[in-house]
Amino acid sequence: MGNWNEAIIDEAVTTEGQARELAAVIVAWLAEEQIIEDRQCDCCLGDGACYPPGRRFMQACGGSENDASNGNYADFSRDAVNGMRVVASRWAIVNMQGGFGPVPCPACAAPMPIDDLYAAGNLWIEQVSDTMTCSNCEQASILPKWPHPDIRFVALAFEFWNWSPLSEEFVAEIGKRLGHSVTTMIGKA
């Protein structure tokens, strides 16, 4: 069966200081709206701060408590994996069910070998380099901009574990509050 997650990824943040500052803004807003609870828990997979769903968590999914199979707060709050994990450091968000094929260059769309992305990602996580250079157009782009459907290197992301699909309006509001473009990625662990 497995556990699903949908991540909202900030493509502009590259430093941990900026990531922590912006994460605090989003966490405070989500807690105020009761989309998450204002406390940490262990109901996510992976490292990082994790927050349980709040009573109004379905607002993030564009509906009310009755709009989805996990829409009932009382039932969903008992699930072992149901939180929002905050990634506020350089890391990789991975869909373990992915195909891991080539990654298109964000500048020219030329396919680059996935091994090049892995190598650049290791340097990203170790804080040695911020970018990967395309061998076709020779443009260097920061790692969060490389759009692979199954692995994304990030400094700031919010992973929603086993929630109903997030609404476009909710994702757009997160981007607006961050002041940056965001993208989403769906994965399974």
Image: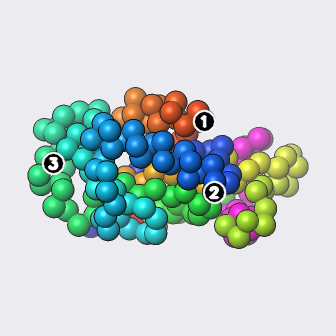
Q: Residues within 10 Å of mark 1 (few under 14, many from 20)?
A: some
**Do callouts 1 and 3 mark residues in contact (Cβ within 8 Å)?**
no
Task: Give me the residue at 63% from left, 54% from top.
Answer: 17
Q: Position of residue 67 (x, y in %)?
A: 17, 37
Q: Residues within 10 Å of mark 2 (few under 14, many from 20)?
A: some
Q: Residues within 10 Å of mark 3 (few under 14, many from 20)?
A: some
> Does residue 45 belong to the magenta stretch?
no
Q: Position of residue 177 (x, y in %)?
A: 50, 33
Between 105 and 130, the one lying in front of the other is 130
**Residue range (magenta):** 105-124
Q: Which residue in the structure is indicated by mark 1?
A: 180
Q: Which residue in the structure is indicated by mark 2?
A: 16
Element under label 1? loop
Q: Is label 2 or label 3 in front?
A: 2
- Mark closer to the chain start, 1 or 2: 2
Q: Which residue in the structure is indicated by mark 3?
A: 73
- Mark closer to the chain start, 1 or 3: 3
Q: Is label 1 or label 2 in front?
A: 2
